[in-house]
C-alpha cells in the first residue's frame, strides 16, 4: 500500500520568516487521519528566511532529526553544543528529560530543511545532540543510513533512541535504487528534489509517500532526485 500525499495538499503556515508545510498534524494544522506514521510523528518541510530562525525553545522525550536541503542551519543548546550543519548533512537531537535549543539561518540565502520527529522507545533519558556530514556522492545510486536506533546498522550512522532508520539516496534520471522492508515495518518517503516513481506510484518534489505492506521498494528517478525516507515500526 502506497498513499501519495501531494505537497500542494499538505497543511502548513506562513509566518514571514518561516514558510512551512506539515505532512502530519502539527501546530494549528490538525487532521485526525494524519497524526503519525508508526513512530514517525512529525515531518515538516521548512523554508527559513535569511538571518532568522527558531529562537531558544524546549523539547522533551522526542528524537528530532534536521536534514538540511539547502543553505545551512546553526544550532545552539543548553548542553553547550554549537553546530553549523550544511546542505546534505544531518543533525540529531535526543530531547530526553529536556533540552533548550535554537536553530537559526545565519546565511544570506533561504535555508530549507526537513524537520523530522520520531517518538522514542524510552522516555526520561539524558538529552544529547550530534551532527555529521553525509556527502551526496557517498549515496549516489543507493540508500545509505543517516541515523538509526536499529541493531546491526552502520556504526557511522548518527544514533537515535527509536526503532527507526532515516536514510537517503541521490539518483540520476533513470537510475533505480532498491529499499527492502522487514515484515511489519512502514516507510515514509519524500523526494527533496526531482521526481521519482516508487512501485508504480509517481511523486514530485515535496510529495509524501506513506508506505506499508510492501517488501521491496523500487525507487526510479524520473528526473535527477534526492530522496529521504524514514523506516519505522
Image (cartoon, helix red, strand yellow):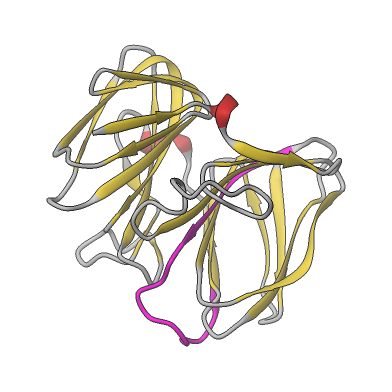
- Judge from the rendering whether residue 142 lies leftward or rightward of residue 54; answer left or right: left
Residue at 82% across, 40% down: 49
Q: Position of residue 82 (x, y in %)?
A: 70, 69
Q: Quadrant of residue 214?
A: top left
Q: Quadrant of the C terminus?
A: bottom left
Q: Residue at x 39, y 28 (%)?
A: 4
x and y percentages locating residue 38 in the rendered image: 33, 56
Residue 1 coordinates in the image, percent (x, y): 23, 34
User: In the rendered image, is residue 105 in sight?
Assistant: yes
Position of 182 with respect to 2 (left or right) is left
Q: Is residue 20 visible?
A: no
How many callouts does the rendering have?
0
Q: Which stretch did the figure color magenta?
A: 111-128
Q: Nearer the viewer, residue 43 or 12?
A: 12
Residue 155 occupies quadrant: bottom left
- 76 and 126: which one is in front? 126
Is 70 drawn above or below residue 198 in the view shown? below
Amino acid at each position: 500500500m502506497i498513499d501519495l500525499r501531494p505537497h500542494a495538499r499538505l497543511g502548513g503556515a506562513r509566518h514571514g520568516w518561516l514558510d512551512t508545510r506539515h505532512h502530519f498534524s502539527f501546530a494549528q494544522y490538525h487532521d485526525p487521519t494524519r497524526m503519525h506514521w508508526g513512530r514517525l510523528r512529525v515531518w515538516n518541510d521548512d523554508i527559513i528566511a535569511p538571518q532568522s530562525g527558531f529562537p531558544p525553545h524546549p523539547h522533551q522525550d522526542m528524537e528530532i532529526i534536521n536534514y538540511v536541503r539547502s543553505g545551512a542551519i546553526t544550532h545552539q543548546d543548553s548542553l553547550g553544543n554549537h553546530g553549523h550543519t550544511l546542505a546534505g548533512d544531518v543533525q540529531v537531537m535526543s530531547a530526553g528529560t529536556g533540552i533548550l535549543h535554537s536553530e537559526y539561518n545565519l546565511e544570506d540565502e533561504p535555508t530549507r530543511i526537513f524537520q523530522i520527529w520520531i517518538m522514542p522507545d524510552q522516555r526520561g533519558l539524558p538529552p544529547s545532540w550530534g551532527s555529521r556530514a553525509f556527502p551526496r556522492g557517498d549515496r549516489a545510486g543507493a540508500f545509505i543510513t543517516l541515523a538509526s536506533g536499529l541493531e546491526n546498522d552502520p556504526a557511522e550512522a548518527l544514533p537515535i533512541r527509536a526503532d527507526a532508520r532515516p536514510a537517503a539516496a541521490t539518483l540520476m534520471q533513470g537510475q533505480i535504487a532498491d529499499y527492502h522492508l522487514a515484515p511489519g515495518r512502514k516507510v515514509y518517503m519524500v523526494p527533496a528534489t526531482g521526481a521519482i516513481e516508487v512501485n508504480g506510484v509517481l511523486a514530485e518534489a515535496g510529495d509524501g509517500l506513506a508506505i506499508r505492506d510492501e517488501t521491496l521498494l523500487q525507487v526510479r528517478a524520473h528526473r535527477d532526485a534526492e530522496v529521504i525516507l524514514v523506516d519505522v515500526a
